[in-house]
Image (spheres, rainbow, N blue to C red):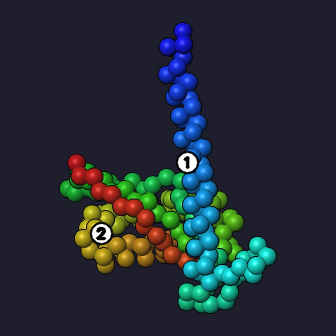
Amino acid sequence: MLQKLLPVIIIVVAGAAGGGGGFFAKTMMSGKASNAESSAHGEADDGHGEKKAKKGGHGGEDASSSTYMKFSRQFVVPVVHNGRPKSMVILDINIEVDSGESEGVYALEPRLRDAFLARLMALSGEGMLPQMLEDMDKLEYTKMALLDESRKIMGDAALDVLILDLGIQNY
């Protein structure tokens, strides 16, 4: 009986120890990373446990002047050549948003996804998407086209479009 339970007990104990160690490491590393990041972005500790932001930093902007809207899913766009699917482009896109206007941004996600997908399909038809890996001008053009679409919906709250990941699957 003990021989049957011993492997299960070892797995449970090892899993709990690994999970606890991972949680502890994540907590310790995120604390050090946030301290190093806040120091690098012009925040100072006044000795009372509160951090005060200094004016200036990188380019005179506060680190909290913008936030990022992450779409819940990636964009999958087919590349069609002569009426047949040739490849598929997968994009992970975020929008940099003014932090003062970021509260209602996620409510606009369905409209943004629709506009982005329509624009990406048009760009795919023009042959822009498959060549983004090789030509940085085409990548920048795609980002500007998506920023234009986001500003039509969000107004000036959209500051920039970030393409975080790009994958191309050939058929």
Image mark for residue 132: 2
As drawn, the residue found furthest toward the right would be: 48
Q: Is residue 128 above or below residue 14?
A: below
Local SS, label 2: loop
Q: Quadrant of residue 16?
A: top right
Q: Residues within 10 Å of mark 2 (few under 14, many from 20)?
A: some
- The three-letter code of the residue at mark 2 reads Met
Which dot, 2 or 1, sits closer to the camera?
1
- The three-letter code of the residue at mark 1 reads Gly
The residue at the point 37 percent across, 76 percent down is 140
Q: Using the image as rendered, state which of residue 88 and residue 17 is in the foreground.
A: 17
Local SS, label 1: helix
The residue at the point 23 percent across, 52 percent down is 170
Q: Is residue 25 above or below residue 13?
A: below
Residue 121 shows in this picture:
no
Residue 64 shows in this picture:
yes
Q: Is residue 78 above or below residue 4?
A: below
Relative side of 16 to 127, left or right? right
Relative side of 163 to 62, left or right? left
Of label 2 and label 1, which has the lower sequence position? 1
Image mark for residue 22: 1
Residue 111 in picture, x, y percent from top left: 56, 60
